[in-house]
């Protein structure tokens, strides 16, 4: 796919996320891996009305080549790509239910959400919680980099999810599945639940191995 079409695709998917309330204001960011570098949504831009021509183009060293200045969370994306060579795209949102879960006490920091559905087990899998760091803090990049080799999705404490996928569609679908599972998890608080068993999860992962 040409770079022009990739730019259009980023703007299209970003608008879809914005229109459905999965991101708001100027929050959230998307990136796509190129042969030499990345395309990233610009800093301070609303995902609801991106201009494809102004999407940031970065070289392999992370330097801005063209377009507006990239998201200030570009380091999160680069950290994921460094540890996941097969990832083709990364999505980071401040989606409401996922952020709400990231603020709860007494959640399992090694695996935040239970496998309530087969599609969550398939598209997200284990979801670790990354400790809280202020936005833009280099220690946040280090924490993400440490976990990214083993996890294509993670939840940043008091912040939101960051998810890598082999394509932009895969990253978006996994992020949406994470948000819907977070919504289910919150709706079921105080109720007896029946998540998938470890055997059922293992079977799902055997049938649908992730290569993100």
Image: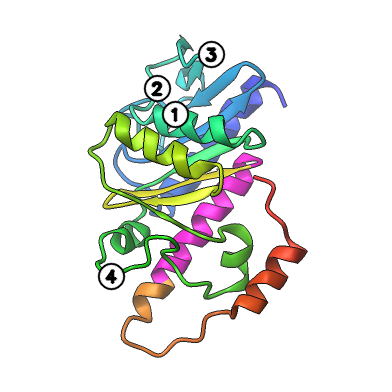
Q: Which of marks 2 and 1 is nearer the N terminus?
A: 1
Q: Which of marks 4 and 2 is nearer the N terminus?
A: 2
Q: How far apart are marks 3 and 1 (CA)?
A: 14 Å
Q: Earlier in the sequence, mark 4 or mark 1?
A: 1
**Dot 4: element:** loop
Query: What residue do we see at 46% from left, 25% from top?
Result: 51
The quadrant of the image that shows the N terminus is top right
- Choose mark 4 or mark 2, whichever is in front: 4
User: Between residues 66 and 115, which one lies in front from this camera angle?
Assistant: 115
Q: Do the residues labelled 2 and 1 touch (CB within 8 Å)?
A: yes
User: Between residues 60 and 111, which one lies in front from this camera angle?
Assistant: 111
Give the residue at mark 2.
70
**Dot 3: element:** loop
Give the residue at mark 3.
59
Give the residue at mark 1.
41
Q: Position of residue 173 (x, y in %)?
A: 58, 53
């Amino acid at each position: 796919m040409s770079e022009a079409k990739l730019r259009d695709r980023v703007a299209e998917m970003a608008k879809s996320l914005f229109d459905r309330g999965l991101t708001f204001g100027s929050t959230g960011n998307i990136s796509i891996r190129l042969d030499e570098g990345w395309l990233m949504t610009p800093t301070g831009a609303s995902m609801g009305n991106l201009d494809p021509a102004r999407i940031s183009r970065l070289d392999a060293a992370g330097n801005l080549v063209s377009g507006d200045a990239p998201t200030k969370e570009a380091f999160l994306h680069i950290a994921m790509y460094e540890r996941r060579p097969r990832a083709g795209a990364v999505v980071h949102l401040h989606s409401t239910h996922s952020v709400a879960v990231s603020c709860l006490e007494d959640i399992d920091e090694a695996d935040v959400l239970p496998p309530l559905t087969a599609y969550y087990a398939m598209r997200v899998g284990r979801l670790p919680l990354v400790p809280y760091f202020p936005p833009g803090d280099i220690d946040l990049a280090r924490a993400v980099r440490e976990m990214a080799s083993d996890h294509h999705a993670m939840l940043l404490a008091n912040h939101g999810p960051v998810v890598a996928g082999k394509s932009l569609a895969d990253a978006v679908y996994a992020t949406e599945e994470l948000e819907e599972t977070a919504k289910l998890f919150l709706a079921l608080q105080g109720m007896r639940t029946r998540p998938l068993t470890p055997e059922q999860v293992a079977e799902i992962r055997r049938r649908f191995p992730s290569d993100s």
